[in-house]
Image (tube, grey):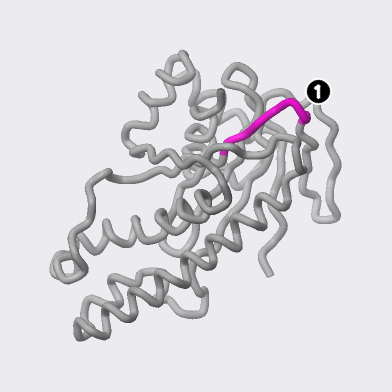
């Protein structure tokens, strides 16, 4: 059973009540007048999730989590296109379809768990920022399996699309942001220099603790950039 979401305080910790769970995780009660956005940085078989609430000028980290999107006991489901590369095409297509259905099912369950863990009506997410490597549309499966570069790209899309679809089914507005464009996008959206934004996001580690690596920072910045 997945661990409970990890919650923490963002930029303004004095104004928000907090409790500590038996596992020592800091939980924050969001103010009822605030909305939030979910940031997603996905990998092979999992995704880093950060929920940021408040406003563009006054953000707060509400929750940090990890979505499990593949069967941990079966390595092939974490890199399904690599696994399908050497299969006969008909078998490869059936395998990819099965992995896609499983990833979408897992993403939907993880999203419902995430949203159910947030206080109803208090900072409920409205948007979901999904970081991507490219906006290019993938060709058909046969062409993908014939190119190692396309296999890598397809696997990235495989898990991102699962989380994006889960967010849409949950009623969130999904915005895809190219990872390489995030700094400029956030700077324009928030009206601040990119370096200032990165310093503030990095500073969240002081109250959240580990893990607060590149994945969490990117997800947090992407979510923050969508706040009204």
Query: Of 211 and 89, which appears nearest the observer?
Result: 89
Q: Quadrant of residue 82?
A: bottom left
Mark 1 highlights which residue?
15
**Above/below status of 92 relative to 208:** below
- Name the residue located 36 percent from the left edge and 39 percent from the top edge: 179
The spot of residue 181 in percent (x, y) is: 33, 31
Residue 19 lies left or right of residue 48; in this view the side is right
Query: Of 22 and 55, which appears nearest the observer?
Result: 55
**Above/below status of 200 relative to 128:** above
Q: Which residues are magenta?
A: 31-37
The spot of residue 115 in percent (x, y) is: 66, 50
Query: Of 209 and 104, which appears nearest the observer?
Result: 104
- Name the residue located 62 percent from the left edge and 22 percent from the top edge: 55
- Name the residue located 46 percent from the left edge and 67 percent from the top edge: 103
In which quadrant will I find the N terminus?
bottom right
Element at label 1: loop
- Asked whether 190 falls inside the magenta stretch, the response is no
**Above/below status of 79 relative to 86:** above
Q: Quadrant of residue 67?
A: bottom right
- Name the residue located 54 percent from the left edge and 29 percent from the top edge: 224
The spot of residue 91 in percent (x, y) is: 27, 85
């Amino acid at each position: 059973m997945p661990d409970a979401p990890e919650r923490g305080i963002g930029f303004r910790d004095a104004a928000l009540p907090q409790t500590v769970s038996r596992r020592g995780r800091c939980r924050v009660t969001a103010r009822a007048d605030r909305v939030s956005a979910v940031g997603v940085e996905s990998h092979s078989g999992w995704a880093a999730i950060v929920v940021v609430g408040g406003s563009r000028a006054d953000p707060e980290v509400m929750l940090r989590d990890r979505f499990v999107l593949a069967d941990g006991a079966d390595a092939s489901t974490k890199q399904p296109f690599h696994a399908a590369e050497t299969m006969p095409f008909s078998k490869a297509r059936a395998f990819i379809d099965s992995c896609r259905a499983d990833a979408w099912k897992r993403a939907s369950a993880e999203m419902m768990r995430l949203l159910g863990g947030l206080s109803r009506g208090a900072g409920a997410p409205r948007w979901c920022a999904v970081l991507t490597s490219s906006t290019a549309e993938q060709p058909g499966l046969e062409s993908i399996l014939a190119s190692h570069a396309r296999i890598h790209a397809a696997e990235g899309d495989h898990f991102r699309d699962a989380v994006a679809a889960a967010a849409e089914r949950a009623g969130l507005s999904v915005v895809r942001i190219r990872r390489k464009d995030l700094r400029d996008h956030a700077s324009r959206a928030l009206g601040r220099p990119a370096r200032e934004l990165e310093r503030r996001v990095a500073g969240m580690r002081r109250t959240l603790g580990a893990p607060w690596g590149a994945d969490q920072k990117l997800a947090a910045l992407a979510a923050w950039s969508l706040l009204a």
